[in-house]
Amino acid sequence: MGMTLRVLLGSLLITWALGGCLFTPRDPEDPGNGGTGVVWVDPEVLYDALGNMERALEAKALTNYGASFASGLLEMVLDPGDEADLGEDQFPDWTKDKEEERMRGILTSTDATLDVEWFFTPGVSDSIDESASERYYKDLGYRLTFEEGSKTSVYSGFADLWFQDDGTGLWYVSKWIDKRDDTGNLTWGWLRVQKVVTWE
């Protein structure tokens, strides 16, 4: 038996005798998910950012959800019809922390669930480059199905969703222009403002 093999076997025996392990598995990387265990994908493309938001809300991992937004002030714009009904300037000095806390307040009930769907209308499946550090989706469709016990409420609409590169090649939501669709459902913007669920 070669010297190297004897040393290796000896090390293994000592490690086993001490109840240890040569290879300690490291904790999974947790970029921005606050230890939730929910999959987080570095948003190198806008579609990955949408996936992070969807998974975070469905798992009620609100730290992940907040991490999907850019630092600094966020611009949140209601549909003009919603603004006429709810009033202007509903999101003063809005930040990722305020957005996270607003959605946390909506999902406080232990049996509340939120199913999130993004969908693309024809011609808007690709993001639009505004500049090297700014991109957006125009008329990105969304549908939220909120359930609590036997009750269900559906919100839907479109969003012009703007993203900024944080300087590392990763993309985060910086602006949200909300729009009604033709379903008659209330919008995500309405849900944010009211902070209550309107059951069907």
Image (cartoon, rainbow, N blue to C red):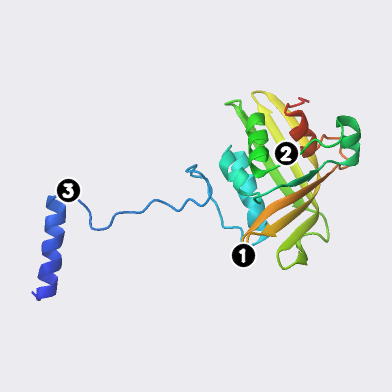
Residue 18 image position (x, y, % from top left)? 14, 50
Label 1 sits on what residue type? Gly
Residue for badge 1: 169
> What is the secondary structure assignment of the residue under circle 1?
loop
| Circle 1 or circle 3, nearest the eye | 1
Q: Quadrant of residue 155?
A: top right
As displayed, is residue 81 above or below residue 17? above
Residue for badge 2: 144
Residue under the point 68% across and 39% down: 99
Residue for badge 3: 19
Residue 183 image position (x, y, % from top left)? 86, 38
| Circle 2 or circle 1, nearest the eye | 1
Between the C-alphas of marks 2 and 3, the distance is 50 Å
User: From the viewer's perspective, is 76 left or right of 113?
Assistant: right
Q: Are marks 2 and 3 in contact (CB under 8 Å)?
A: no
Q: Quadrant of the N terminus?
A: bottom left
Q: Are marks 2 and 1 in contact (CB under 8 Å)?
A: no
Label 3 sits on what residue type? Gly
